[in-house]
Amino acid sequence: MKLFKSKIQDIVVFVIFVGLLILGTKLDFKISDKMYTEKNWLNFFVAAIAKLPFYFVAMYACVNLFISALRKQNKAEKYIMAFVYCLGALVCGMFAFEDMIEVFIDGIFKYLIAMAVGALVSGYLYYVFRNKAEEEIIRYKKEFLTIIIAAAIIVVITFALKSIIDRARFYEFLNRHGSFTPWYKKGTGGDSMPSGHVAIAAALFATIPLFKKMDLFKGKNYLYYPVIALYALLVGLSRIAFGMHYMSDVAIGGIVGYCVSKVVTWILFGFAEENTEIKEGSLLSKL
């Protein structure tokens, strides 16, 4: 019964995003035209924090696995995996804080400062958790790997789709830097489709197994799906109002983030998402 309820929740969330895609396919331009509000403090705020939760959790996971890697006996595994997780923490930090930094500065310096902030936060997390027991890290290892792998795949897919579809953003259309095209046709230059912010917000579903273990909602497991779905939808609506995306961009971003996070979770945990054991000598134990 528990498994059935979980899958019903999965289906409901997926259907919501598909419904938004159907709506956007028919009314993309009209919706953006009605919702567009050039400059708004709420849109700035939502944009600044949209990617923060998932990438912060990914950074947290990288730091913990970095600590675990440094304790490996095999020197090759030790230094290779420590380097990978250190780099992962820096990249996650950059993605987590870049939108906040963009409020004040843009261009290459935005990424450099964001990475520097990410490095400082990662360093602080390392200082706090450097003496954490190996058993505690291993207990959450599958959750950590789920989040890191999902984040990497989502970044690759969203960047690839943006390059292929090449759709101009709504504000670019208003500034005559491109023309409006449906999401399923080649665009006139831009990176509107899909919404990376919504993809990452929807990818928070990958963190549900970890949140359940940490008992974030004090045993109220039914809250995870509606809270995360609502957060992703709010991020999507703010991106439309900001003129950065159309409804269909938001929907496909949500589908990408949600599906990738769930598929990676199912591959590592199994369909019931309860298999937390890592076999000794397996690939997962070496990561």
Image: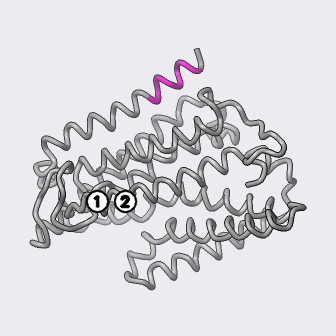
Residue 243 vertical placement versus 20 (above, below): below
**Of residues 114 and 194, which is closer to you in this image?**
194
Q: Is residue 8 in the magenta section?
A: yes
Q: Residue furthest right?
A: 73
Whole-percent x, y for residue 164 in the image: 28, 59
**Of residues 130 and 263, which is closer to you in this image?**
263
Image quadrant assignment for residue 22: top left
Residue type at the position of mark 1: Ile
Image quadrant assignment for residue 131: bottom right
Region rendered in magenta: 3-10
State the residue position of label 1: 164
Looking at the image, which residue is at 49% across and 35% down? 225
Whole-percent x, y for residue 273 in the image: 63, 31
State the residue position of label 2: 160
Give the alpha-carbon distance from disc 2 to disc 1, as whole Å: 6 Å
Residue type at the position of mark 2: Ala
